[in-house]
Amino acid sequence: MANKVVPRTFKASLRNHSQVEGDLDALGFSGSKLWNVGRWTVQRVWDEIEHIPEHDELTAYLKNHERYDDLHSQSSQRILQELAEAFHSWYSKRTNGDTRANPPGYRKHGDEHPRSTITFKNKGFKLDTENNRVRLSKGKNTKDYWSDFALCEYETRPDVDLPTVESVQQVRAVWTGDKWELHFVCRVEIEVADAPGESTVGIDLGICTFAALAYEDETAELYPLGCLKEDGYYFGKHIANCDDSSSERAEQLHRKWSNRRTHYFHALSKHIVERCVEKRVGSITIGDLSGVREDEDDEVKNWGTHGNLDLHGWAFDRFTNILTYKAEMQGVEVNPVSERDTSKTCSCCGRERDSNRVERGLYVCDSCELVANADVNGAENIRQVPLSPSAVSAADRSNGWLAQPSTVLFDKETGSFVPQEQVRS
Ligand SMILES: [Zn+2]
């Protein structure tokens, strides 16, 4: 056991929601306006000199703009930082060959995010944990004659105590779609287990097979997570039937869908971490490109537009975050690596040739005649990324296992994962 300081977020509801709603709405809309001003500025800079400004450059451009003073300066700064991060993340996905990634857009009324999340840093909030109150600072322009802050009374879950005031780094006001809530971002000390071992595993995330795992001990597992696909059809159909995509009913369906996805991701992460402990894995390498392989195009189209967007974009990142959090508690480290070329390269001889092909889910190498499960081949390549070449070749590994992964299915009845051969129905 060792102690480690980690970031943790505690959510809280607002007890005086109706009193502060107006103030928070005003701040959220101001955040969206500043975001749009920033968005427009980035575009201008890009058109002129083909450069995406870093957040400090963007802040330097805009700190005298009148919209900047609608929020506390630290809150404005944070909005521009998020914008710059979103642009750089989109740009690196594009550079890595993900043609589906879209640049961050403008925030309009009627959008999913008309009210931007507002972050308050140390100078922007004053917290009173004894009375469960927090003062959130407004900007110079939005101060009323009688008040320059919104006084929120919050309530955390009964089983959660907010750590000491000093540990709270940021307070975020987040619009959930029907109400505001507060997120307290803290640094807390936790006990983490010692690493279960020194072995490694590679994880390839995809649409057809949600996760493929290649372990150092020459075994492989596939997690198709069919429930994601079933939900995709179900919710996709019902949302499409809504008259208006921004209607209350449609938003409700989106939220329910997203909660169910989060549930699956927790269950799968928990299972994978348990497998790592059993197999003495100390380090997970996971592909971080949320793009989808070209041969899966047809599958993707069948999911309906919204399903794709959701799954391509944040779903893989979300899963990786949950996995990282759970793994870290067990002393297992998680390293995201670029997935670039990992699906095209032969994990056995390392060659990438045009004649190497994928047929019916099998990867066939023309050089060394390897026949592997395509997802396992990708996962094994990902596992090898951080290893030294000698650690890979000197191992003198067999390769028959690459073609024989075991498939593990999610059982909705019990909420656990079972090997396919044990599923009776
Ligand atoms: Zn080969």
Image: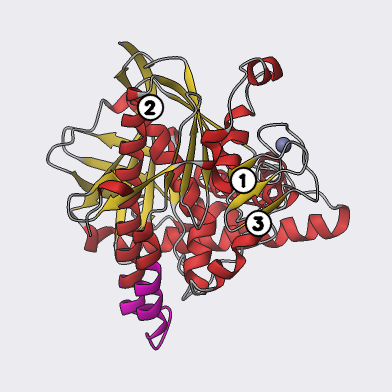
Residue placed furthest toward the left: 158
Residue placed furthest toward the top: 1
Q: Secondary structure at mark 2?
A: helix
Q: Is the residue at mark 1 in contact range of ligand 1, meaning its CB lies under 8 Å from it?
A: no
Q: The residue under label 1 is which amino acid type? A: Glu
Q: Secondary structure at mark 1?
A: helix
Label of residue 276 in the image = 2
Question: On the image, numbered disc 3 is attached to which residue?
Answer: 38
* Residue at the (34%, 60%) spot, across then down: 227
Ligand 1 falls in quadrant: top right
Instruction: Give the mark toward the camera: 2 or 1.
Output: 2
Looking at the image, is mark 2 or mark 1 earlier in the sequence? 1
Q: Position of residue 412 (x, y in %)?
A: 23, 56
Q: Which residues are magenta?
A: 231-252
Q: Residues within 10 Å of mark 1 (few under 14, many from 20)?
A: some
Name the foreground residue: 363 vs 265.
Answer: 363
Label of residue 277 in the image = none
**What is the C-alpha distance between the residues marked 2 and 1?**
32 Å
Label of residue 85 in the image = 1
| Image vertical order of residue 349 relative to residue 340, above or below | above
